[in-house]
Amino acid sequence: MPGTVITYIVRRLIAAIGLLIIVSAITFSIFYLVPRWAGASPETLANRYVGRAATEETVKLTAERLGLYDPIAVQYWNWAKGVVVGAEYDYGAGVERCPAPCLGYSFITKQPVWPELLDRIPVTLSLAAGASILWLVFGVAIGVLSALRRGSIFDRAAMTVALAGVSLPIFFTGLISLAFFSYRLGWTKPGGTFVPLTDNPVLWAQALILPWITLAFLFSAQYARLTRAGMLETMNEDFIRTARAKGLKERNVVVQHGLRGALTPILTIFGLDVGLLLGGAVLTEKTFSLPGLGKYAVDGIVANDLPKILGVTLVAAVFIVLANLIVDLLYAVVDPRVRAK
Amino acid sequence: MRIKRLRTVAALSAVVALALSACGGSDESPSDGSTGAKNEFNAALTGVVSPSDKKGGTIKMANADDWDTLDPGETYYGYAWNFARLYGRSLLMFKPAPGKESNVLVPDLAESLGVPSDGGKTWTYKIRKGVKYDDGTEVKAQDVKHAVLRSTDKETFPNGPAYFEAFLNLPAGYKGPYKSKGVNTDSAITTPDDHTIVFHLKNGFGGFDYLAQLTQTMPVPEAKDDGAKYRNHIVSSGPYKFENVQPGKSFALARNDQWDQATDPNRKALPDRYEVALKVSADDIDNQVINGTIDIDVQGTGVQPASLSKVLTDPALKASSDNATIARLWYTSINPTVKPFDNIECRKAIEYGMDKTSYQTAYGGPFSGGDLATTIMPPLVPGYEKFDLYPAGPDNKGDQAKAKEALTACGQPNGFSTNMAYRSDRPREKATAEAFQQALKPLGINLTLKGYPSGDYFSQYAGNPGFVVKNGLGLATNGWGADWNDGFGFLSQIVDSRVIRPAGGSSNTSVRIPEVDKMLDAAIAETDTAKREKLWAPIDKRVMEEAVIYPGVYAKSLLLRPKNLSNVFISEAFNMYDYLSLGVK
């Protein structure tokens, strides 16, 4: 049994590497091919990275420095080679060795991308971890309670709030809660005050509590509705009747038999959601000025900064692959039917 | 004339603000005695609000974006130049004073203004003795030479201003001190001794002193210079040095104990620290400035649309804000390369037919948008002359009769169809394009609006001559702010035909007038400031005669005055609060 699990994991990881190559190649070609199809020359592309008073000479130098005159396949090869074996970077006064995984240097800020990503991952990780725990606990609990008291005032109220939660965008709830809790009441920290967990756990939580709640509000609404629907279905199944007939306590019937059956689809979605979130909760990070991956990606896109975009894409893809792998492994724990197969 | 009107506005607003605050019963009097301007609307435009010499405290600033770069050799934003004076000393600087005085150049690292000789081809500066870097070594003329030379390496610093390489008599093929190591550059800059630097130009340039105030003349010791990486550990020559630089996130400035007040007549260096947060959400910055947790929105471009009505309708907030005029013109290029605009009469039809007030409305009205423009140069630029070649009727809503006349003269009496480009991610430009569409429709001129992303707007679309012709972009929204308040600083990049590049990227999309190029050259060579300033208005007029630019509004912005800071005033040189003089109350 453990042997097959390990083979399974290894197989999935190898597939993941293939996926990363495909994802990066597609990002790369979208970036360079689309403007080329629209008629852009290497110089027009280089124009994005020079100042407003640049001369033609400057544009040519920049195109050369960024390798824009090379065929796209060669450019991709150079970039991919940097990821695997590292690269060399000319910073004017000398040459710097950029060790593997060298995701390149920002076209705009000339900073190496990999350390910047490493710097931003903890922010996004903190945000995703706190929010996902909140929404999972609250979403599932509300969903279960609603299903058990179907039609009650609690059920109707919870589902109305859930509907509101799904419909309200983060930049709305985020700004409103910032205005109220931060500026009016002064209970929480204003935006842009992230402190690493290792520096000061209290300040860390204080700065993140509002983004957590805002993000969890959006997601727990979905989870509450999903759980409710799943629970309503499973609680009508034959095996629930059997469990009750055996004389099990209602609590055990609900948690061990009902919820367990309803949990599988929720787990699937949870894996995807967390994976996506780790790639950057763009709106939340932007609203609360958190220097995470999502904001980094948006900055990269706005500035046409390819190395940044590629870097975040890769990291996000890795997170999604990992999250899905973990979910698949967890299926076996949650659902005995999967284990039997 | 202009100042007079501003004063009237200020006085009127002050009366209104005072009356309103009296009603509310919250009669706030300035806490720092009776000197200085009262804390009222527009007070910091002409006077110093809360003057004080109190030292200490921390000034907190926030930036909605990343700094373009802290490297003085490459930075190219007004706010960055304003701020750079805290950690660097250029040869000259704009006087840190409120109002008109802030346009005056004063010596900073140099002992006096530049001494021209040889018809403005040679400029000599004496450097002050005893100025030290934060590591205790003395600043030498050679460091200024190195700083200027490195900035000409456009492979390493592609984003910086390109004036020095354009004017200095550099050896042919010179690629900067890294790539062309050991090349003799005495043809461009000489340093006869440690405290003298002499610039040698290709042609006479009367306004060279303006180049000497660029951050590119802030000294950089060669031993500490590592090209593109220097931005992360800049050596300070000003009263503050860098601490805790976190690229893309934040940085702080702390006192440079090697800085000596005796060598520096311009800086007060009041606060102990500056803390700057980068990439903070723009709307959040406004809220935090109102709230007092952030002192200043460092970009200094004014409040976001969301905060505008809030500030203008709240008497207390309005009293602590300033409606600054900016040396920036929002305009529309009329491209003669696109038919039928090759005919000047068709271009004139646009000049007459457009509703000027709708341009202003598109930009947010008289407060955040700006004043109606009839010239290319904004009134803030010395040498500005008021004229109006295409009067838009008594109510400024356009002169339909004149427009029709022009259309007939153009051979298009029933109008024509063309395209108009705008930056799709700029709501104000979109509104401008829609205003053109509406105003020109009655004349039979049908506009198809085409939005393009602002990042590539000039490089690939509206500023790319081939693209403009191929896609028939007859009109294109545009905007320009002066590098410094001077005719050359404002005009050269938008009316000189020689800056147009075939691959695109220039802000000049429509002005190709050989006569104007010659007039510019003549003005540039004039070393007498008063005489030179008189030469800009005729250039402005000559371009307007060709009807290739439709001036929309002279920009204004609404700035929130920091409530916890002292010595607050707006510098006309930067069109925002002067960052050099601020203190903590």
Image (tube, helix red, strand yellow):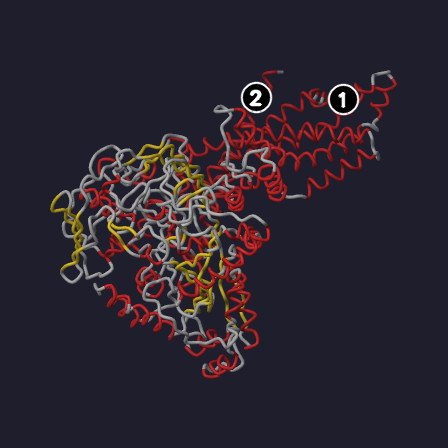
Of the pair A243 and A5, the residue shown nearer to us: A243
Q: Mark 1 points at which residue?
A: A255
Q: In which quarter of the image is the C terminus of chain A?
A: top right
Q: Is residue B122 left or right of residue A244?
A: left
Q: Which of marks 2 and 1 is in front?
A: 1
In terms of sequence position, does the residue under pointer 2 or pointer 1 come before the other? Answer: 2
Q: In which quarter of the image is the N terminus of chain A?
A: top right
**Whole-percent x, y for residue A3 in the image:** 58, 16
Which kind of residue does numbered mark 1 sit on?
A: Val
Looking at this rendering, what residue extends furthest in the left direction?
B192
**Whole-percent x, y for residue B153 in the image:** 26, 47
Name the subunit of mark 1.
A
| Residue B538 placement: quadrant | bottom left
Looking at this rendering, what residue extends furthest in the front direction?
B34
Which kind of residue does numbered mark 2 sit on?
A: Thr
Q: Tag on residue B521?
A: none
Of the pair A321 and A218, the residue shown nearer to us: A218
Of the pair A257 and B59, the residue shown nearer to us: B59
Mark 2: secondary structure: helix
Q: Is residue B224 left or right of residue A11?
A: left
Of the pair A242 and B266, the residue shown nearer to us: B266
Q: Tag on residue A7?
A: 2
Give the class, few, some or many, for how many residues have Cα within 10 Å of label 1's Cα (few <14, many ≥20). Answer: few
Name the subunit of mark 2.
A
**Whole-percent x, y for residue B401 in the image:** 51, 82
**Whole-percent x, y for residue B563 in the image:** 47, 44
Q: Which residue is drawn at 43% across and 59% down?
A: B325
Real-space CA distance between mark 2 and mark 1, rounded to the nearest whole angstrom: 33 Å
Q: Is residue A149 left or right of residue B51?
A: right
Q: Is residue B510 visible?
A: yes
Mark 1: secondary structure: helix
